[in-house]
Each structure stands twice: as C-alpha cells, then as structure tokens.
Image (spheres, rainbow, N blue to C red):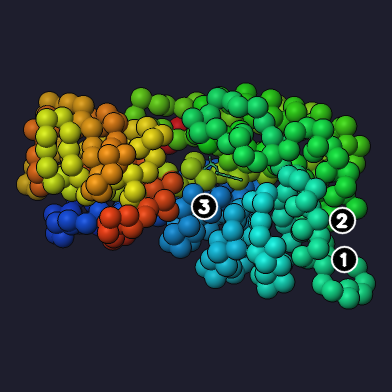
Amino acid sequence: MAKIRHGFYLPHADPVLPLVDAFVAARRPTDPLLCLRPAAIAAAARRFVEAFPGDVLYAVKCNPEPRVLRALWAGGVRHFDCASLAEVKLVRAQLPGAAVHFMHPVKARPAIAEAFDRWGVTDFALDSAEELAKILQETVPVGLVGDPPALGLFVRLALPKGGAVLDLSGKFGAPPDEVVQLLRTARPHAARLGVTFHVGSQCLDPPAYARALALAAQVIAAAEVPVEIVDVGGGFPVSYPEMTPPPLGAFLEAIARGAENMPRGTRLWAEPGRALVAGGGSVIAHVQLRRGSALYVNDGVYGNLSDAGTLGFRFPARRIRLGESEDAPAEICDFTLFGPTCDSADAMNGPFRLPADMREGDWIELGQLGAYGACLASRFNGFGSAQMIEVGDPPMLPTP
Ligand SMILES: Cc1ncc(COP(=O)(O)O)c(C=O)c1O
C-alpha cells in the first residue's frame, strides 16, 4: 500500500498496524491522540547506528515512552543516555541488556549512589571538580578492600553558541582550561575517560561538530593524559516545514574530519535524541472553535505541543475530516493555533498550513512530534489526558 502526502511518496511503513485516518474515523477522538510509529523509529535508529562510526546512545529524555525504547532496541540501539535516576530505572526495567550511561553533569548524591549500587551504572558525566568528588565519594563503598570501581568518567566541554535552533551552551560544560584540569584529576580514578559536548539541539550546521572536535582535541592534547572516548552528543536535526537540514551524511563527514585530529584509537560516541524519534510521533488535535485564522484546539503548549509555543517550532499539519479524502484539492491557508488552557501563552503562531475551510469538528494531525512532545506535557488547567496508539503510517516529513 502506498500513500501520497505533502507531495512525497511515502510507503505504508507497517502494514500490520492501523493507519491514523482509519483510527480517527472509527473512534472520533475528542482528547488529544498520540500516534506512535514504531517502524519509523526502528528505521531511523537502524540508519543512524549503521552510519555512525562508534557507539550510539539514545538520549532518553527526548521520549522515554517504553514502546519507543523497544522500537529503538529493535533498530539496533544498545546504549542509553539517561539524565535522571528515573530514566536509569526505566531503561533497566524495559531493556535489561542495555548499557546505561548517566550523562547529566549535575546529579543528586542519592541518584549517583543508587544508580551505581543498585542499577550497575558505572559511566557518569561531570563538568566540575565538585561533581567529580561527589561521584567518587558516592561510588566507593565504605570500607572498600581491593580495587576501586571501574568508573567511566566523562568531562563535559562547554561550546560557544553555534548554529543550532536550541542553544545548550548556557548551562552545562566547563571551559577548556578547566576541562584540562578535570581530565588530569579524573584520570587516576577512571577505567575509561571521555570528553563530551553538545553542539545544541536541531543543529543545522555540520561544521559545528568539526569545530567542537577540534576544540576537544586541543583540550585532550593539553591535558597530556590518555582519553579513550569522545562523545559528540546529540543535536542531529530533522525536517520541519520550511526547514530542511543538511543530510545526516554531511554531519557524519564533519565528524569524521574532526576525529582525524584525535589520538589514534579514540572511540566516538553520539547521543542522538530528536534524529531518532521525531518522525516517529504525531499528535491528533481536535478543533473546538474557529475565529478568523485562529483555531482553538484541544492540545497546546502545556500539552504535547510545547515547542510550538515560545520556541516557535512549526510542525507539518494536515486536516482529517470524516468522509473527505485528503487528496482532494483544497485552498491552503496559514493558521495559528490556541491551546485549551486559559493562559495567553498557550498560543502557537506557526503558521500551520491547513485547508482554508477549516471548521469546528475537524481534526489536525501535527507531525514530527516524537521528540520533545508528550514528555513535556503537564496537567495544567485539568487538561493533558491523551491516548497513545501505535500506527503504521510513515513520518509526515521525509528523513534528511
Ligand atoms: C546531554 C544531552 N545529550 C543528548 C541530548 C539529545 O539532543 P538532541 O535531541 O538534540 O539529539 C540532549 C538534549 O538536551 C542532552 O542534553
């Protein structure tokens, strides 16, 4: 079976699961509906794992849904980057064979201790001497006799603000001279030592990785201690309306170029989130009122559409109206969306491109929401209940 949507030829990705349109026609959902595409997630994961010249750690924060974790596993992902103890426990419960890495540079002491003692986590990120001390104190059992634990210690390097839609340079990471000191201090305690960084999320600039790797190489050379791993973080982009990023190959080439400056034998890691799961999720919202070019819908920035608010993300949108084929030619207009809460900030300027005759009772499918969508939803104003189903549809936009 094949479908034509948004001008692209897209195969029915999983012929066993229902399609979105059939589900909406049968159930007529009036609460937001999350549509998960496991086949699309597994395919994106497989592609990344096969292409990346090192280990691929999925950034669990991006979408911790167990069905997503299982789809990633099916796609060959065996490593998981966790930001919290809850994520560590989740991955251990869902995927007992997975390698778990605790990559948040600032952790609570009990979280470090429990991750290590109870859940067998030995890899930890840090960006300060204080955090290094915490990790060492919380992972050495009192009265230890014999060898200290075989820790993996990963020092996060701060990067200058780069060409990413979402800058992540403001909060974490030590400047280069501090990283040099931290590598030296951590070395005697580490079975494996690494440098990690993040170029920012939805990075549109492949050379950003090469520049970051060049800086990491300088820092490693200055530290004059062996470093086994360089973790290039996440940031790999996906398509959004009017935003077609360079292909994955351009990023991997930049990484390969940057890695040439590394000491021989340095292993590469990556921590992609968005690139693996964004295309694997969409949200079905229901129109409750139309006022001019504004549509009041049942999901919003306090629900599954957070990034459409202040961050101004645009998502691919299509109308679902019972009894009408989406292939029928329709005049397309720009719409803004208002979410269901009483807060004026619950507004999504988009614009979202939809048929000109949108009206109350229509559904809107918003795509590319498998990343940073449902995991950011709150119960504000009593809203936030959403059903999740698995569908066989392909992503709403092609993978770059
Ligand atoms: C440490 C770390 N690694 C990986 C990611 C995933 O980034 P992305 O979704 O841009 O690939 C994030 C996102 O915030 C992060 O903070």
> How many residues crowd around disc 2 within 10 Å: few (fewer than 14), some, or many (20 or more)?
some
Residue 126 seen in this snapshot:
yes
Res 399 quadrant in image: top left
Asked if disc 1 and disc 3 are in contact, CB closer than 8 Å, the reply is no
Q: Is residue 268 visible?
A: no
Residue 93 place in picture, x, y as percent: 54, 70
**Residue that appears at 61% across and 34% down:** 169
Q: Amino acid at mark 2?
A: His
- The residue tagged 3 is 61
Whether tag 2 and tag 1 are in contact, CB under 8 A, the answer is yes
Query: Please, what is the three-letter code of the amino acid marked with disc 1?
Result: Pro
Residue 240 pos. (x, y %):
38, 32
Dot 2: element: helix
Q: Residue at x 88, y 76 (%)?
A: 143
Neighbours of disc 1 within 10 Å: few (<14), some (14-19), many (20+):
some
> Mark 3 belongs to which amino acid?
Lys
Would you say 41 lies left or right of 164 here? Answer: left
Q: Nearer the viewer, residue 84 or 12?
A: 84
Question: Residue under circle 1?
Answer: 148
Q: Point out the image quarter for the C terminus.
A: top left
First in residue order: circle 1 vs circle 3: 3
- The image shows residue 332, relative to residue 85, as above or below, that is above
Real-space Cα distance between discs 2 and 3?
Answer: 28 Å
Q: Earlier in the sequence, mark 2 or mark 3?
A: 3
Query: Which image quadrant shows ligand 1?
Result: top right
Q: Which mark is residue 189?
A: 2
Q: Which labelled disc corresponds to residue 239?
A: none
Q: Residues within 10 Å of mark 3 (few under 14, many from 20)?
A: some
**Quarter assignment of residue 10:** top left
Q: Is mark 3 within 8 Å of ligand 1?
A: yes
